[in-house]
Amino acid sequence: MPRDVIRFDEEPVLVKLDFAEGIQVEGQYGVDWQYRVNDSAAVIYLPKEGRDALKDCGAKAGDNVAIRKYKRGKMWVWDIERVTESKSAPQATPQPESSRALPSEAQPVFQQLASVLCAAIDAVSEAQKYAAGKNLPLQFSADDVRAIALSVYIGNQRNGNGAHK
């Protein structure tokens, strides 16, 4: 089953690294490093600058990291930070109060559901851009995003890719 590809922009995205080292791959614009994240539910691709920022933050396998990509002048800047239990999540991605009260066995489910919700948002955003390029206005509602995310989550559970088996 293909994994979701997580993309980055100015809003930090929280992911859990499956491995500390990425796999070197040939990307659209040259060499990238592919990392499996969120218990193999998704992958991320980082250019050399992103990989260097990830190494500089000292992240290891199993660590949660907040990744943000933004433009400074004409250059893309990668801001990557380890998120520990003693540190709160970055401002742009606050965790709901309910996540702090979850028992430890519920945390993987919470993280997986959050991951598929983020992926659904990215998917509808890309679909809307694509449709606009074809001069076909297309709008998704919050209910559409929820339905897409839940469909992916349920499919993952059925295929044995979920947190609980």
Image (tube, rainbow, N blue to C red):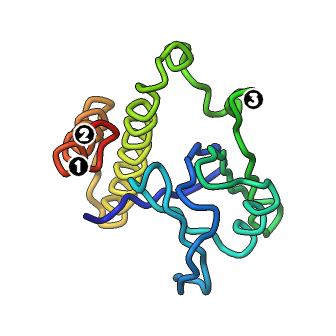
Residue lying at 53% horizontally and 86% vertically, measured from the top left: 26
Asked where in the image residue 58 lies, by quadrant, the reply is bottom right
Residue 5: x percent and y percent? Answer: 43, 61
Check disc 1 and give the amino acid type: Gly
Q: Which residue is mark 3?
A: 87
Residue 36: x percent and y percent? Answer: 49, 62
Check disc 2 and give the amino acid type: Lys
- Labels 1 and 2 touching (C-beta < 8 A): yes
Cα–Cα span, label 2 and label 3: 30 Å
Left or right placement of residue 88 versus residue 143 in this view:
right
Q: Which residue is mark 1?
A: 160
Residue lying at 77% horizontally and 62% vertically, measured from the top left: 53
Q: Which residue is mark 2?
A: 165
Residue 74: x percent and y percent? Answer: 79, 69
Check disc 3 and give the amino acid type: Lys
Cα–Cα span, label 3 and label 1: 32 Å
Instruction: Determine the secondary structure under disc 1.
Output: loop
- Where 130 sits versus 159, above or below? below
